[in-house]
Image (tube, grey):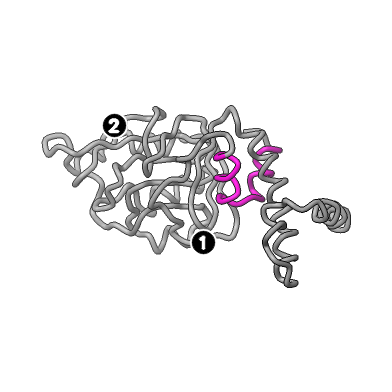
Amino acid sequence: MDTTLRDKLMTVSVATLATALFKRGLRNQVIQGVHPVKAKGVNMVGPAYTLRYIPAREDRNQLAEFRNPEHPQRVAVESCPPGHVLVMDSRKDPRAASAGDILVTRLMVRGVAGVVTDGGFRDAATIGNLDIPAYHTRPSSPTNLTLHEALDLNVPIGCGDVAVFPGDILVGDDDCVIVIPQDVAAEVADEAIEMTAYEDFVVEKVKSGTPIIGLYPRTRDEYTAEFEAWRQRNGR
C-alpha cells in the first residue's frame, strides 16, 4: 500500500470518510455491528485480505480438521500479507469464534495491520491487549468448527452487511470500520484531510460559543476567510 495514502488515512475518522464516500454515492460502507475489541487510540489502515466462512456441517468439521496443514483459517493466518487487514465473513454469527488469541498473536508477529470479523473472538481480553487492532461483535468462546467452516481465501465477501473485495482499503478507528473501494481511496483520503481540518476549526469555534448555523456546514463567506487564517496559524 502506498505509504503516503496510509499516512493520510491514519489521521482521519471513519465518520469523516463515510461522509466523503456518501458524496460519491456510496452509502453502505461502514461494517455494521463491529467494534474494537479494545480501543487503541490510533487507526487501523490496510488493504483487505479475506476469509469466508460457511455454515459448518458435522461430517466436515471435527477438531481433527485443525491438523490439516491446508485448513483455510490457518493458511489465512500464515498468508495474509504484512500491512494488510485480515477480514472474515463469519455470517454475522458470533456464537462460535472466528479466531482466538494464538492466531491473532501470529498475525501481529507477522506484521499484519489488523483483523476484522462480523462474528466474535475467543480470548477477547487477551486479544484486546495485543499490539494489533482487532474488531468483532462480541466475545465468543466455542471454536469456530462448531458452527463455521473456513472455506475460501481472498475472494469477495460480505462482512457486517458490506461487500469487501480483496484490495479494498479498510480503515478502523475507536468506533468502527469502513471499507473504501481501492480506485477512489486516494481522492477520498485527500478530501477527508480537508474535511478534518475544517471540522477541527469548527470545534474551536463552537467551544468559544459560535452558533452552528452558517458555520457547519459553511454557508457564510465570513467563515471562509477566518478558516484560511486559522489554517495558516496552525500549519494545516
- Where is residue 153 drawn, in percent x and y? 37, 30
Q: Is residue 217 left or right of residue 91?
A: right
What percent of the width, then of the height, locates residue 127?
43, 58
Residue 158 to residue 231: above or below: above
Q: Which residue carries the number 2 mark?
A: 151
Q: Is residue 234 above or below residue 168?
A: below
Label disc, if present, on residue 85 of the rendered structure: none
Residue identifier under label 1: 39
Between residue 92 and residue 106, name the one nearer to us: 92
Residue 232 x, y percent position in the rendering = 88, 53
Front residue of 39 and 215: 215
* Residue positioned most to the left: 59
Dominant SS in magenta? helix
Q: Residues within 10 Å of mark 1 (few under 14, many from 20)?
A: some
Label 2: how many residues lie within 10 Å, few (<14), some (14-19) or many (20+)?
some
Q: Nearer the viewer, residue 171 or 112?
A: 171
SS at badge 1: loop
Q: Is residue 196 left or right of residue 167?
A: right
Name which residue lies at 39% across and 47% down: 103
Three-letter amino acid code at disc 2?
A: Leu
At a point 37% along the width and 60% down the height, the residue shown is: 124
Range of residues picked out in magenta: 4-22
Q: Nearer the viewer, residue 114 or 21?
A: 21
Q: Amino acid at mark 1?
A: Ala
Say what secondary structure mark 2 lies in. Answer: strand
